[in-house]
Image: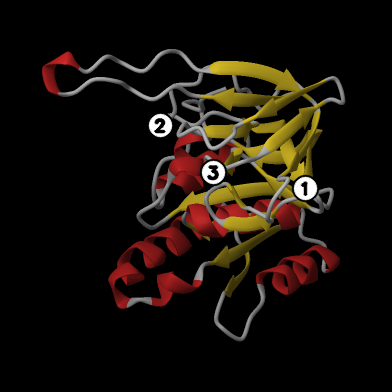
Amino acid sequence: MYYYLFDSPLADSKYSAIINRIEFRIIELGINGRMDRLTILKNMRELIEGAIKRGAETIVIVGDDAAVARAVSIVARYNVTLGVIPVGPQQQIASALGLPAGEAACDVLSKRIVRTIDLGKVNDQYFLFSLDIPAQDVTVECDGHYRVSLLGLPRPFSICNFSPRSRRVGACSPEDGVLEAVIEEQAVGWNLFRKPPARPSILPLKRAKIFSPTASIPLMLDGQTVVKTPVTVEVAPRKLRVIVGKDRLF
């Protein structure tokens, strides 16, 4: 049983034509199911959990990265499968999963290629891509064996589960059972003399504690959700079943 949840921005009239095509293609392929639309009065968690209680086995999010990232943390708690129909401007997650935009994604759903992938977990929340850490006085204790301290160094630092196309990191796979602490170097020099960034330092880990000796510092999950130190981050192996396309990045 499929359950389709349309994100609230798709109520804009500019999306009417594509939503109509999606709804028609769903029926045409025989993968129809109940459809709901998010509004300010409808909570995503309540809608998804209600659908699961009614017997939904595949939760399909129609929307962009922000909607999918929120849904991942909900769906991962249940024995159901996540599907995505990408509509909207930000589609990094769909691209990583090999999903085409709009009604073409319905054909991928109907073929139902399902992979079970790892997620990262921070306290009681899950993330697909990464936990991003600002360049501040932060210490990361990795697997209880060693520590990495940023000490305010101006360089990108993240705990990565899966590397989307926009990143240069190639080692982060959602099927390897580990996370990676990724410390990237900044480019140096200017204009014609600018040197390319060095390859990032990658440290595999399964569990890390992140804290600051001074004030609590905000961290970002998948570019969408803010959590504050101190936090514990760990890998959640084979936590999410997701429908993917042939052009996926793993």
> Which residue is located at x 48 percent, y 24 percent?
184
> Which residue is located at x 72 percent, y 66 percent?
48
207 displayed left or right of 14: right
Q: Residues within 10 Å of mark 1 (few under 14, many from 20)?
A: some
Q: Is residue 31 visible?
A: no
| Total residue callouts | 3
> Which residue is located at x 50 percent, y 26 percent?
246
Mark found first going from the N terminus, 1 or 2: 2
Quadrant that contains the N terminus: bottom right
Check the image and report above or below for 6 versus 177.
below
Q: Secondary structure at mark 2?
A: loop
Q: Is residue 219 visible?
A: yes
Q: Which mark is residue 231?
A: 1
Mark found first going from the N terminus, 2 or 3: 3
Residue 8 percent across, percent down from the top left: 49, 73
Mark found first going from the N terminus, 3 or 1: 3
Q: Residues within 10 Å of mark 3 (few under 14, many from 20)?
A: some
18 displayed left or right of 24: left
Give the residue at mark 3: 134
Residue 171 percent across, percent down from the top left: 58, 16
Check the image and report above or below for 1 versus 232.
below
Mark 1 vs 2: CB contact within 8 A: no
Quadrant housing residue 188:
top left
Quadrant that contains the C terminus: top right
Between marks 1 and 2, how big is the CA–CA gap? 26 Å
Amino acid residing under circle 3: Pro
Give the residue at mark 2: 166
Residue 12 percent across, percent down from the top left: 35, 76
Q: Secondary structure at mark 1?
A: strand
Amino acid residing under circle 2: Ser
Residue 3 percent across, percent down from the top left: 66, 62
- In the rendered image, the residue lying farthest to the bottom is 41
